[in-house]
């Protein structure tokens, strides 16, 4: 794979081991936490605010760029979770935290707080709020990438991903849902991508610690087996839309013990981040 | 405008991401981790929000072509297509153009 060969060659550009263009591709490829939050809701998970990062401490707890960026990602996922459950009262508190951290990271231009506030004031607007949250984070990532501040972008994405994984694992403890379990197991692919991304910034002590923690998680994931059987797909037109039905099959061999271990490590990493 | 394109997302699908292909061809390939048991819809909105002369193709992790909005047999461009994903992995979305046109937005949405 291109990413691995690039890593092996350790090409250096703008103090990055992975070329800037490849960094951009990895940043683009990280899936949205919205998919995970939707699955949690669909699997019967009830809204649980206690799973989320507290909003009363966001202004005083985070002191350096690392803490601010990674917690901005965490709050972004929390806002997505709150929006999917249409909890507009809680959305305001998360918006305030996001605005505060964005200001401190000098990326507040991407948040039109008044529009967010208007949308969050009505449960009927929660889909629009979700859309605005996703596109604003997309714009932030593009901006940081262009400004050669990709490490902050990587931290925002890592924080968002970690929070979604943490919430999933907590829900999975109570709700033995096979799809949720598979979703947690599938994160092996994303974790590998994030570790390649963060390998660029190991000069930063905080990122070095985070990288070591994520590698503990990677060790557990390395024992999860994914078996794919490829088959030809079938294309058909349904109501004017071209639909491609993939006939390939995939199975994931993951145990409850492995899910619990992933949950335990994720909780521990997150605890050190949210302080 | 991406907003107009997003408004065309089909019932039951949730917006995920926007892509802005560059006609010059430098950044026309994007990757994304797709999940099994998920339907992904890729909408293509060019000038006047139609997909004429824009080919969006999805490739799997081994770069094998698996889906496209372009029906080669009938030379027809669909403005949207759905890929029913059964294998989790990294997928690539490539945008190419049959002729020089005003470009365009790609919108990715999903449904479980």
Image (cartoon, coloured by chain):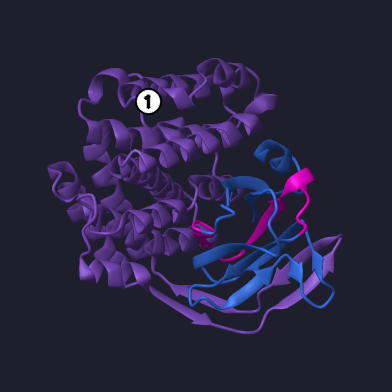
Chain colours: A purple, B blue
- The residue beneath circle 1 is A102
Segment tinted magenta in the rendering: B26-52
Point out residue B102 in the picture as x, y percentages from the top left corner. 69, 48
Image height check: is B60 above or below B26? Answer: below
Instruction: Name the residue rendered at 73%, 65% in the picture.
Output: B69
Image height check: is B98 above or below A209? Answer: below
**For the view shown, which residue lies furthest in the front direction?**
B100
Instruction: Identify which residue, A58 or A184, lies in the foreground.
Output: A58
Point out residue B49 in the picture as x, y percentages from the top left corner. 76, 46
Instruction: Identify which residue, A161 or B109, lies in the foreground.
Output: B109
Q: Regarding mark 1 in the picture, which secondary structure is present there?
A: helix
**Image quadrant containing the N terminus of chain A:** bottom left
Magenta-colored stretch includes residue A34: no
Instruction: Identify which residue, B23 or A151, lies in the foreground.
Output: B23
Q: Is residue A126 left or right of residue A150?
A: right
Chain that bears disc 1: A
Instruction: Please give the count of numbered marks on the rendered protein.
Output: 1
Image height check: is B94 above or below A24? Answer: below
Instruction: Name the residue rendered at 47%, 27% in the picture.
Output: A110
């Amino acid at each position: 794979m291109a990413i691995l060969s690039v890593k092996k060659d350790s090409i250096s550009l703008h103090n990055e081991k992975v070329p800037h263009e490849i960094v951009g591709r990895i940043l683009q490829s990280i899936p949205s936490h919205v998919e995970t939050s939707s699955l949690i809701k669909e699997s019967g998970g009830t809204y649980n605010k206690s799973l989320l990062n507290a909003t009363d401490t966001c202004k005083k707890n985070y002191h350096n760029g690392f803490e601010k960026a990674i917690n901005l990602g965490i709050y972004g996922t929390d806002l997505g979770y709150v929006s999917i459950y249409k909890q507009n009262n809680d959305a305001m508190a998360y918006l305030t935290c996001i605005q505060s951290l964005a200001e401190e990271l000098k990326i507040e231009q991407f948040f039109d707080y008044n529009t967010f506030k208007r949308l969050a004031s009505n449960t009927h607007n929660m889909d629009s709020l979700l859309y605005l949250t996703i596109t604003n984070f997309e714009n932030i990532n593009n901006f940081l990438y262009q400004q050669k501040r990709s490490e902050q972008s990587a931290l925002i994405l890592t924080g968002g991903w970690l929070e979604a994984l943490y919430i999933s694992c907590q829900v999975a403890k109570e709700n033995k849902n096979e799809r949720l379990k598979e979703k947690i197991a599938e994160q092996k692919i994303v974790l590998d991508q994030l570790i390649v991304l963060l390998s660029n910034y190991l000069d930063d002590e905080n990122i070095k610690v985070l990288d070591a923690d994520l590698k503990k998680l990677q060790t557990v994931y390395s024992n999860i087996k994914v078996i794919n059987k490829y088959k030809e797909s079938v294309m058909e037109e349904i109501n004017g839309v071209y639909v491609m039905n993939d006939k390939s099959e995939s199975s994931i061999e993951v145990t409850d013990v492995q899910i619990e271990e992933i949950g335990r490590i994720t909780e521990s990493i997150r605890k050190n981040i949210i302080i | 405008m991406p907003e107009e394109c997003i408004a065309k997302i089909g019932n039951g699908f949730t917006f995920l991401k926007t892509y802005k292909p560059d006609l010059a061809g430098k950044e026309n390939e994007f990757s994304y981790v797709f999940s099994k048991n998920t339907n992904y819809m890729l909408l293509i909105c060019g000038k006047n929000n139609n997909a004429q002369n824009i080919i969006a193709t999805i490739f799997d992790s081994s770069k094998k072509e698996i889906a496209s909005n372009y029906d080669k047999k009938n030379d027809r461009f669909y403005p949207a297509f759905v890929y029913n994903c059964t294998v989790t992995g990294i997928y690539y979305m490539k945008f190419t153009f049959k002729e020089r046109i005003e470009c365009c937005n790609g919108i990715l949405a999903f449904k479980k």
